[in-house]
Amino acid sequence: MIKAIIVLVLAFVLPLAAQAVLYAMQDRHVHWRQADWSSAALAPDPSKVSAAVVQVYAARAYRWRGIFGVHSWIAFKEEGAADYVRYDVMGWGRALRESIGPPDGRWAGNTPQILFEARGPGAAEMIPRIRRAVANYPHAENGSYVLWPGPNSNTFIATIARQVPELEVSLPSLAVGKDYAPGWVSLMKMPSGTGWQLSFAGYGGAGFAAVEGLELHAFGQTLGIDILRPALKLPGLGRLGMARSQVMP
């Protein structure tokens, strides 16, 4: 029993230590005012794509926070719209922000990845429900943001996804806050809506779902295995294996 506990602790700690070493070897000390927030050219150009589009993004967090976590957000455009609407939750000022930058903007120099994308009629049907879920997000005002264990940007995306079943998004293992719940013990849907999880206020827990696979949660980090698209999900290092971005036609 003790050996099993030691192995489990090392499975959480060693990947984080490896990521910390990688961070120390890179130059990530640019001040946020001088950081690159430009488009990563991942969002379809509205002048060329008239169809409705919904995308969910995540990028490594700013500076040392990127060892442990990612920042995630959602962006969409209506059919025929000339621009996107983007929603983020941030740690200063009003927590919920609208269109603070390009839909696919780099986060303090870190290139985002697409976690979910839908285009066409399916995306158009989602957008009104996404708008309602955003309007009803309970942690939107000043002082609502908590870096750990949440609510934060990843709590926001997980909350929106749970209310819009078509957003079968698998948030990264570094998405600190995705498992946050206001009660000390909560049984709730996984963000993808394809399974269930037990959460101890975001400090720990476990879950199983068709999209996410099997996950163990501890102190905001995730250790897991994706069964349908074989991959390990490790603290700090993220996903090792097949890509998991969900794309709907």
Image (tube, rainbow, N blue to C red):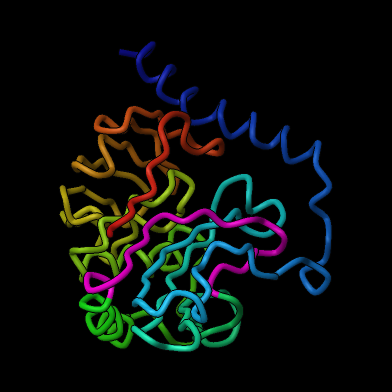
x then y, percent, for residue 192: 24, 55
What residue sits 78% from the left and 39% below the top? 24
**Left or right, 205 with reference to 66:** left
- Front position in the image: 219 or 245: 245
Q: Quadrant of residue 4?
A: top left
x then y, percent, for residue 61: 61, 57
- Front position in the image: 131 or 182: 131
Q: Specify the segment rendered in magenta.
A: 103-123
Position above or below: 31 against 92: above
What residue sits 33% from the left and 27% below the top? 230
Quadrant in which the N terminus is drawn: top left
Q: Quadrant of residue 128?
A: bottom left
**Left or right, 1 with reference to 12:** left
Q: Quadrant of residue 209?
A: top left
Q: How many marks?
A: 0
x then y, percent, for residue 134: 33, 82
Position above or below: 39 against 137: above
Position above or below: 24 against 137: above
- Front position in the image: 132 or 126: 126
Residue 116 sits inside the magenta stretch: yes
What residue sits 46% from the left and 24% below the top? 11
Residue 25 sits inside the magenta stretch: no
What residue sits 64% from the left and 54% below the top? 65
x then y, percent, for residue 91: 57, 74
Quadrant in which the C terminus is drawn: bottom left
**Left or right, 208 with reference to 176:** left
Position above or below: 155 against 64: below
